[in-house]
Image (tube, rainbow, N blue to C red):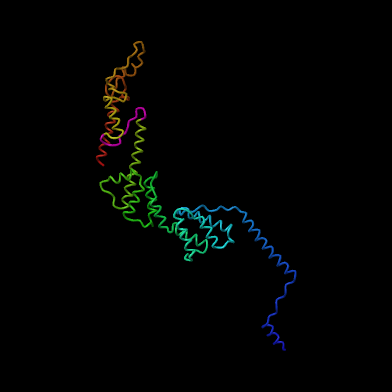
Amino acid sequence: MSRQQQQQQGEAFPAPAPRQTREEQLLAMIATLQQQVNTMLLQQQGSRVEVARPQIFSGKMEDVSTFINAARIYIRMKMMEEAATTQVAWVLSYVQGGVAEAWKDNLLDELAKGESEVESEEQLFTKIRNDFGKTSEEERKIEHLRTIEQRNRTCDEYVQEFKKVARGSGYEGRPLIEEFKRGLNGAIRRKLAEAEELPTTIGEWQERAVRLHRNQRQSRAEERVLEKNAARPGGNAQPRGGSYGGRGGQIMQRWGDNGGGYRGGGNRENQPGPQRDPNAMDVDRGRGGDRTCYHCGKWGHMARNCWERSKARIVDMLQESAKENEGQ
């Protein structure tokens, strides 16, 4: 056989791989055994870890994610070696009560007849999420839209959240207006319903509600200021509106009930002057003698304490407020 033929034969039939020595075989066996021991140790360690079991699932939409996550973690930690049918049956054992009980019975019948597509725990979780959970963003927004309320927030805050939730919910026209009205505070809703011309669009309802609530808050703030001013000694109350309404009307009513005088009762000008001690030193002689008021000319008080002056000021404020209301 020529050298060229030997080279061609060598290319057609490559040389066999060198055999492993006995030492290499022993090392490979030791590595395999060590890997098996580590696997057994991990399994034993996993079986000793305490894992919380899922709570009973009764079909409530808000419990879907919690139930699925708890069941999935338990299966991963404790039941990975079990068959898929065993895992499905274990998950279904925690589905009890309410509408979920009837749902489970129907699914078990389908599994027994081979009519169900559920073959693993993940397929079961998907079915639970589809049948009991929130399946779309639109449904989540609709649910939020039906429960949103103003409560203690300002109407501006409520309107902004309502707009955000309503976008993409599919609600429009009259149904959207009714949901907006439902979430308003009762006082604002009644005021809007008492208007001569009701709003016709959702934008008009929102605009009027915001404006009405702002006016109410401003009125309450003014009322608190008036009450503080009225509580101060010698303070004058600013009227809320025309026709002697609000605090101004109350002050004028008290003034009238007291016979045109100050709150202490009676007319101040008819009250007798203070009795002077004949033996007392006349310290007022250098200050104006008998303390006659320079404003009304009556004896017994000074001009800065004159009630006639305060009364005229209140009347001027009431008239000025009435003119402003007529101009509006």
**Picture coordinates of residue 153 (x, y %)?**
39, 45
The part of the image, by quadrant, that contains residue 282 is top left
Q: Is residue 230 above or below residue 284?
A: below
- Asked if the stretch drawn in magenta spans residue 232, the answer is yes
Q: Foreground residue, 196 or 316?
A: 196
Tell me which residue sits at (64%, 57%) in the image.
44
Tell me which residue sits at (34%, 29%) in the image.
235
- Asked if the stretch drawn in magenta spans residue 111, the answer is no
In this view, which residue lies farthest toward the top?
279
Q: Foreground residue, 282 or 125?
A: 125
**Picture coordinates of residue 86 (x, y %)?**
55, 61
The part of the image, by quadrant, that contains residue 166 is bottom left
Asked if residue 118 lies left or right of residue 295, the reply is: right
Asked if residue 162 lies left or right of residue 5, the reply is: left
**Residue segment shown in magenta:** 231-243
Asked if residue 35 lies left or right of residue 188, the reply is: right
Quadrant of the snapshot with the N terminus: bottom right
In this view, which residue lies farthest toward the right?
22
